[in-house]
Image: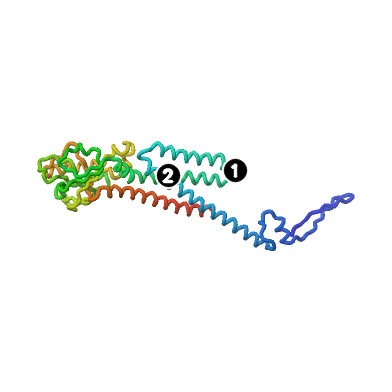
Amino acid sequence: IARVSTRAYGRSNLLLSTRTVSISPSVMAERDPLIARGEPGMLPRQKIAQSSRAFQSRQGIRVCLAILLAVAVALTVALAIDFFFFDHPNWVWASIVVVLMFALIMHDFYGGARRHMRAIAWVVTISCIVGTLIGFTGYFRYAVFYRAAINMATYSDASAVEPGGIFRDASMITFNEFTRVQHGRGAGYKDVDVAGDVHCVAPVMADSQSAHDKVTFWAVGTNCCADGDHHRQFQCHDAGDPTAHGAVVLLSKEFLIPRFFHFLLPEAAGEEAHMQALHLQNDFFGDVSSETPIFVRWVRDPLRYVEGYWWSTLSWVFGGTFLYGVGVFFAAFHFAK
């Protein structure tokens, strides 16, 4: 029902009269620009429902595309860091800056006219930041050890009586069958500053060495030596396996990354504690360490142990990206309502 006002002008006064005109719903539907055009013969309510379904369909597609874009950007940035940061750190930083600049340009130059461009810019920016956090966390926890180890020298058929200077560039060493861990001569040091962990050491010696010879190689581990005072039964990694003769060198923090980032290396945080455990072992058993001891993890297969760092890196990256994608999924549907 619509009311139409008409004016009639008399000789002496203004007469305002109102008459009522009936307009059918079908005519209103045809003349209303806000009601979507549907199939011929459809009622207005059906046309509105059809328009609503089309709008919801488009919204769903946009949400799905936003989720895919967010996951793709975060995953790409994280993998780029873990794959290339060790060899090309400047390229990685430059790539991250380029992505953020691209998002900023998209937001400022195209966001005003098109709202979806502004949304894309925000998705790219947040995803780049999240991918950077995931990538660097995985890098300092796992990937840096893998990347360093595979770029260093590997020795086989080595002996503990050889001078330690020969192995200064080594990341993996396979000793001969006459070299083994003296797991009955271990010692442990509890560091209250590093989560209260017990850092364990034991000498790696050849059968031909005597108790008065200097020991260059020391097997280390954390929370893996039997209880005692300061002398403990060394049970770290594969020390109890008589067939194990491999060693993965514990690389120093100074070699891996600049000093500013040392706090980000949780696995290398026990170097000083291992040295304290070595002093306790020397005092209790009378062993003599060389001036520059080499700390190793005694394992059956050094290469497989090192590759475990890389698989841990991939698990961290894909797991973190998946959780981020789940968060984006719920956030996108929440804001799309």
Say which residue appears at 30% left-offset and 48% top-offset. Answer: 307
Judging by the rendered image, the residue that carries numbered circle 1 is: 113
Q: Amino acid at mark 1?
A: Ala
Callout 2 crowding tier (Cα within 10 Å): few <14, some 14–19, many ≥20 = many
Quarter of the picture holding the C terminus: bottom right
Question: Which of the pair 329/17 is nearer the observer?
Answer: 329
Give above or below for 30 relative to 96: below
Q: Position of residue 192 (x, y in %)?
A: 24, 45
Callout 1 crowding tier (Cα within 10 Å): few <14, some 14–19, many ≥20 = few
Left or right: 195 with respect to 117? left
Element under label 2?
A: helix
**Residue 231 visible (yes or no):** no
Q: How is the image coloured?
A: rainbow
Left or right: 138 with respect to 235? right
| Disc number placed over residue 102 in the picture, else none | none
Q: Position of residue 170 (x, y in %)?
A: 24, 40
**Residue 93 visible (yes or no):** yes
Say which residue appears at 43% left-offset and 37% top-offset. Answer: 94
| Disc number placed over residue 77 in the picture, else none | 2
Element under label 1?
A: loop
Q: Position of residue 188 (x, y in %)?
A: 19, 47
Q: Position of residue 63 (x, y in %)?
A: 52, 53
Marks 2 and 1 close (CB-CB < 8 Å): no
In the orientation shown, which residue stands out farthest toward the right?
11
Quarter of the picture holding the N terminus: bottom right
Left or right: 225 with respect to 257? left
Say which residue appears at 32% left-offset and 36% top-offset. Answer: 258
Q: Amino acid at mark 2?
A: Val
Left or right: 36 with respect to 283? right
Question: Which of the pair 157/286 is nearer the observer?
Answer: 157
